[in-house]
Structure formats: C-alpha cells, structure tokens
Amino acid sequence: MSPQGYIVLRCWFVVGVVSYISVTGYSGGKVIITCKYERKYTENAKYFCKGQKPVTPQIGWCSDLIKTEEKNEWVDSGRFSLFDDTRAAVFTVTIRDLSEEDSGTHQCGVDIRISEDFYTEVNLNIITDSYTEVNLKVLTGDTPARFPRLRVLKRLISAAAPPDYNVHGEPNTEAAVCGAIA
C-alpha cells in the first residue's frame, strides 16, 4: 500500500487527571468535595466556583464561592471552607447548610496566572426530603432511654429502632427508622 493510504493520528492523554466529579447531598446537610491537582501547582491559589468552565478566559463564567492562597490550613467563608493540602496535592471544599440552590455545575479551580486555569468540574445534586419532629422513648430493659426531639427523615435511613418497638417505645412488629440530626 502506498504512503498516501495511511492517516497518522496522534492523541495525547493526561494520565491521572480527573475532570469530572458527581456529588449528592441532602438539604440542610453538608458535602465534602476533594479536588486533585498536579504537584507543580502547590503554590498556586485554589478556588471553588459555581458555573461553567470558561471556553476562553472571561470574567463571569464561574462565580467564586471561596478562594485562598493559604496552604495547609482551613479557610472559611460563610457556608464554605477550603483546605489546600500541598503534601497530597489535593484541596478539600466543605459546603454546609445545603439547599436546592446549591445544585448545579461547579468548578474546583487552580489559579494559573500565565495560562488557562486548571479545572475539575463538580456536578452537585441536592436532594430535599421532608422531616417530621417526634419525641422518642426507647425501652431498654427496665429503664426507658429518653431522647430529646429528633428529626425523623422519611427517606434516608441512618439508624433502625429495635424491631420489637415503634418510635413511641411501644411493642410493634414494624421496625421504625429514625436518625438523630445534630
């Protein structure tokens, strides 16, 4: 076959770089997001923003929620905290008091002054469930154990009551599901 019959295709792949993270949280709760970056960027500022990654550097594509140049210490800004662990080349973002408005596309960003920033896309999904306030008394032997008001999450299972008792501490064949929310 002649050389004209061949097409040379070269592809470059960056090994070990994660460009997409999907995270699910519950309304009122918190999420912890860990973002990896290349070791050569340990001295660069790190940030977490909401919105799309810019195709070309433009202001306003991704709105910063927290940004820091601090290394190896927690930085807080409202509901957001960021810790840049330079030894592991990762930074961790914590978001507290989640709401439906937090859902959507976010970016973990590394500020690179002379070229395009390094991004990891984060798709954040917030689930809203209803809670019911109850007073719970669980009988343990001869002594009832009393709990302060608990929120019983109807959908998320975090603990199960003994199958012989309902949420009121009365004998029952149905298992009650409840979780203490601090």
Image (cartoon, rainbow, N blue to C red):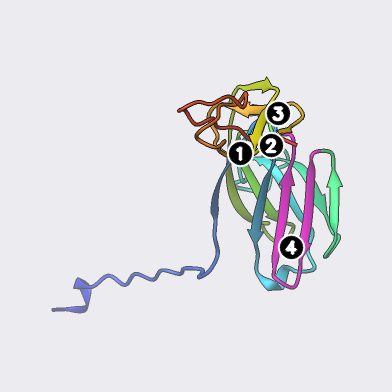
Mark 3 residue type: Leu
Residue underneath mark 2 = 29
Camera-near label (2 vs 3) is 3
Residue contact between numbered discs 1 and 2, judged by CB atoms under 8 Å: yes
Q: Residue at x 55, y 38 (%)?
A: 160
Which SS class for mark 4? loop
User: Is 91 rendered above or below residue 103?
Assistant: below
User: Magenta: predominant secondary structure element?
Assistant: strand
Q: Which range of residues does the magenta coloring cover?
A: 79-97
Residue contact between numbered discs 2 and 3, judged by CB atoms under 8 Å: no
The answer to which of 177 and 145 lies nearer the viewer is 145
Quarter where residue 84 is shown: bottom right
Q: CA distance from mark 2 to mark 4?
A: 38 Å
Instruction: Please give the label number shown on residue 114.
Output: 4
Which residue is most to the front? 142
Instruction: Please give the label number shown on residue 150.
Output: 3
